[in-house]
Image: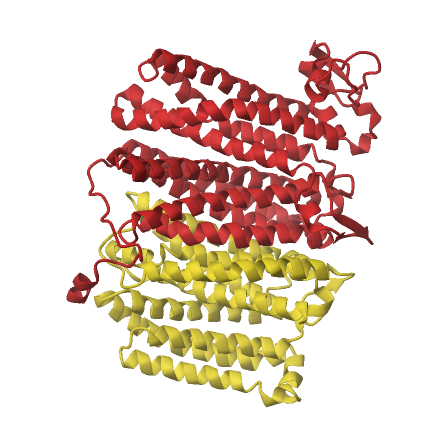
Chain colours: A red, B yellow
Amino acid sequence: MDVLLLSRIQFAVTTMFHILFPVLTIGLAFYLVMVEFLWLVTKQEIYYRMYRFWVKIFAINFGMGVVSGVVLEFEFGTNFANFSQAVSNVFSPFLAFEILTAFFLEAGFLGLMLFGWERVHRSIHFLATCLVSLGAIISAFWILAANSWMQTPAGYKLVNGKFMVTDFSAAIFSPSLLARMCHMTMASFETSVLVVAGISAYYLLKGNHPAFFRRSLGIALIMAVLFVPLQVYLGDVSGRQVFHHQPTKLAAMEAHWETNTTGGAPFAVIAFPDIEAEKNLFAIDIPNGLSLLVTHSFHGKVPGLKEFPRKDRPDVPILFWSFRLMVAIGFVLLFVMIWAAILWWRGRLYENHPFLRTLWVVHPLGFLATEFGWITNEVGRQPWLVYNLMRTSEGVSPIPAGNVIWSLSLFLIIFAVIGASYFYYVLKTLRIGPDLSSPLPPIQRTAGMRPLKVKERGTR
Amino acid sequence: MDLVAIWSGLIGLAIILYVILDGFGLGIGLLFRSTQNEEERDILMDSIAPVWDANQTWLVFGGGGVFVAFPMIYGVVFSALYIPLLTFVFGLIFRGVAFEFRAHATRKGPWNKAFFFGSLVAVIAQGLTLGGVLSGTKVAEDRFAGGPFDWLNPFSVTVALALIAGYILLASTYLIIKTTGTVQERAYARAFRAAWIVLAFQILVTIWTPFHYPSTLSNWFSPPRIYFIWIFPLIGLLAFYEVIISLKKRREILPFVFSVVFFFAGYLGLIASIYPYVVPPSITFQQAAAQQETLSFTLWGVIIVLPLVLGYTVYSYMVFRGKVGTERYY
């Protein structure tokens, strides 16, 4: 294997491992903000207990996100040095701003959020939770700005193969940013509240701490019922955005070979695309479906793959199936949420065992959908690094393949070890369950200094 | 003002802040095997638990800064130092997850090991990276053109060993501030020994550098540098003296402060010796710099945000100041 393919595999492995954790960090932080807010407003102890329970999962998850994220920052230079040198004028400020406005914020207030209960006033603690949550969202913004620029580049001019900035706001707010930012943030929220809902449902089925987990589930479901349909809508917005800016990618996602000249383009529910023959070997089509989806009219023209040179097309089967699996998950979750709404209306939400079991079964699906979405997004960008401007093959580092074989093998081993440990400790935390008896934190004065000065002097 | 100069200064600042802040963090990891007592390990861990993540962020900022301001260096050096840099990352992964996993583990042994070896690997890889940069990089047409092991030589290995001693010094003096009783007593003794070892390495590396990298010698003995470059070893020696004295007097904060000064002196002396070459001996700051618009745009972000970052970092240290108490963080 050559250094290009190896580097691509390594980047895929490291990003696909990494993204699992930020998704939960972003969404769970938001859930924690809500729970702490409810505690401060209603003064009900249960909300404090909920915070302390879910923040344990949050903390383990956050640590994994940090260590797997540092890797990526290095890989731009180690594995894609030529890309880095070519695009840095436009691209690198995104990363710098992410570090400045998000990483420092998260890292700076995480300590207070996890360990500050005894040392600062509740309002300061709440502020810390809010800032960590904000930092997570800002971080997503900059990463999506960087990725969107690669997908739909803007605000640059090319000089001797180097990208020079002409307009920073155009580069940051590239045409695809808004749709993708909304879609990804919502994916994080949706995935996380489903995790909370699924775990809570499991406890309710077992009959452990019913009061505690009813409340956890209730809040998670209120959010999920809002988020899931919204995400279906945002997915549609994203799809049309791809159609407008990356028609090759859209045609590949849909295994759509021939441009429709008369009538609408069909939507293939299932298809087996044959890249060599440039057609689908077998397909179940919905007539006019694709035209309706992306142009919102029955006979809208959708360019087929044959309009684009073979060397500029991404891998059709991967795109076709990853996209469909993502969409399928979205609709499964939509049906579960409709069920939830009906049960809530009848007042039987917490007693219906088939429903609770379903929640438990579907709760990891958000992660899968996120992975399939990113596969669609990134494989769909191929064969380009910067869409239509710089090929992936032009961006790789001048290093021997042996380097990457070495690092890729180690990444696989290390990720297996820490991934398994992560699961083990998360399950262990869940098995131990919430702590319902430890004393509430004392209320400190807002200046936030430590209360135990006198005692300390005495023991020295 | 010259944007390239400002950015060089900023990155220089980020790197030394990282070295100091994560230096004591990694040093705590290196000290993890020096005790068999699980209670004591808890204290070591708690002394850095609320701040290690923020400290490590300075590394990412330094790296990001190089990417912004000197993309050519980012590309060339990161390709050249592929193996030590990713080894460094592997070390950081184990070090980082150990905080949470150890806290949740019933059998803490494996995560104690992960914390120690993760820190050790990270420190050694850091030293090899620095030594590798100073050993020079083959560049052709703005791209790295050397082999995968160019960074490995006796000099870079020596720098790595020096860094181990240096971080143990920082960690021990930091522990003096954060602990009491026997843990503190042992930290005093360890800081004392580490200080002497660091001094020996400093002298060795200083004498070695001109042999390894000849243009430093002419830099040292020709104007204008000859007029000021001797200040740095002088400050270093004074700081070393103060470290030793303050340790003997059982002062709590001064040993750490002077250890930091000791580090600063060595760092500034090194920069003064090789400036204006960043990837000696071929690329200067000016050659490697990014587009002016990129430099100024990002600099505005830094000017607005960095004071806030420094502000809440100091606040966080204030909140968690004082001795590691009996309240366990995990």
**Image quarter of the N terminus of chain B:** bottom right
Across and down, in percent, residue A234 comes to 59, 27
Q: Nearer the viewer, residue A293 or B157?
A: A293
Q: Is residue A54 above or below residue A257?
A: below
Horizontal side, residue A378 vs residue A108: left or right: right
Name which residue lies at 65% across and 33% down: A377
Residue at coordinates 25% horizontally, 34% vertically from top-left?
Answer: A44
Q: Is residue B80 visible?
A: no
**Would residue A301 be visible to someone looking at this image?**
yes
Residue that sits furthest to the left in the current view: A458
- Residue B263 in the image: state x and y as whole percent: 47, 74
Is B209 or A390 nearer to us in this picture? A390
Question: Residue A457, how many percent across, how many down?
Answer: 18, 66
Which residue is at 53% across, 38% downward? A19
Q: Is residue A397 left or right of residue B184?
A: right
Q: Quadrant of residue B320?
A: bottom left
Residue under the point 57% across and 57% down: B85
Residue B42 falls left or right of residue A371 = left
Left or right for B130, reference A126: right
Is A115 placed above or below B135 here? above
Relative vertical location of residue B15 with respect to residue A117 in this rendering, above or below: below
Query: Picture coordinates of residue A203 (x, y %)?
Result: 30, 24
